[in-house]
Amino acid sequence: MSAVRMNIETLNAWVQLKDRSPKPERQQEKAHAFSAHRLPGKRAVFQFARNKSVLPNYYYFYLDHADWGECFIKVCSYAPWGLKLYLNGHEWLKRQSTKEGIGFESLDDGFLVARIRSDCKP
């Protein structure tokens, strides 16, 4: 957990944490982890596989990015410490349309273009 806390300043430099709260949300989820088995013989030879099922903690950092909107980073607390970044493509397109001056109507799962700029050519 200390590695996650130390990188909060790095995340703040790129995005603003939602609600300005540096405390991540924690959830337990199923994951696959490495396991090792010693092979028979005098020499210590091990075989590694990723077939062990575990329930590690995952830490979620909710972010508000200027271009991408609300997104989050998911960090696993168990080796190999996977990290995933989830971005919302609809929100990105809405923000880009607003910057370009393209009118639209926001829908539940997407948006509807209301008008196109006059300087666009078909």
Image (tube, rainbow, N blue to C red):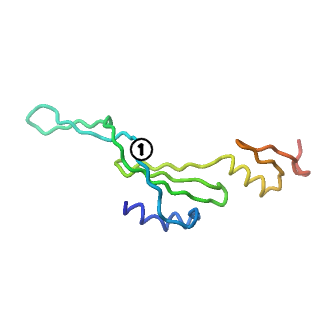
Q: With respect to residue 30, does 85 lie above or below?
A: below
Q: With respect to residue 38, does 93 lie above or below?
A: below
Q: Residues within 10 Å of mark 1 (few under 14, many from 20)?
A: few
Exactly how many numbered labels are in the figure?
1
> Which residue is located at x 42 percent, y 60 percent?
4
> Which residue is located at x 27 percent, y 39 percent?
35
* Quarter in which the C terminus is drawn: top right
> Which residue is located at x 39 percent, y 41 percent?
31
Looking at the image, residue 116 sits to the left or right of residue 7; the answer is right
Looking at the image, residue 78 sits to the left or right of residue 122; the answer is left
- Amino acid type of the residue tagged 1 in the rendering: Glu
Between 106 and 115, the residue placed more toward the observer is 106
Q: Position of residue 55 (x, y in %)?
A: 36, 44
* Quarter in which the N terminus is drawn: bottom left
Quarter of the image for residue 54 reads: top left
SS at badge 1: loop
Q: Residue furthest right?
A: 118
Looking at the image, residue 56 sits to the left or right of residue 119; the answer is left
Quarter of the image for residue 3 reads: bottom left
Between 41 and 29, the residue placed more toward the observer is 29
Circle 1 residue:
29
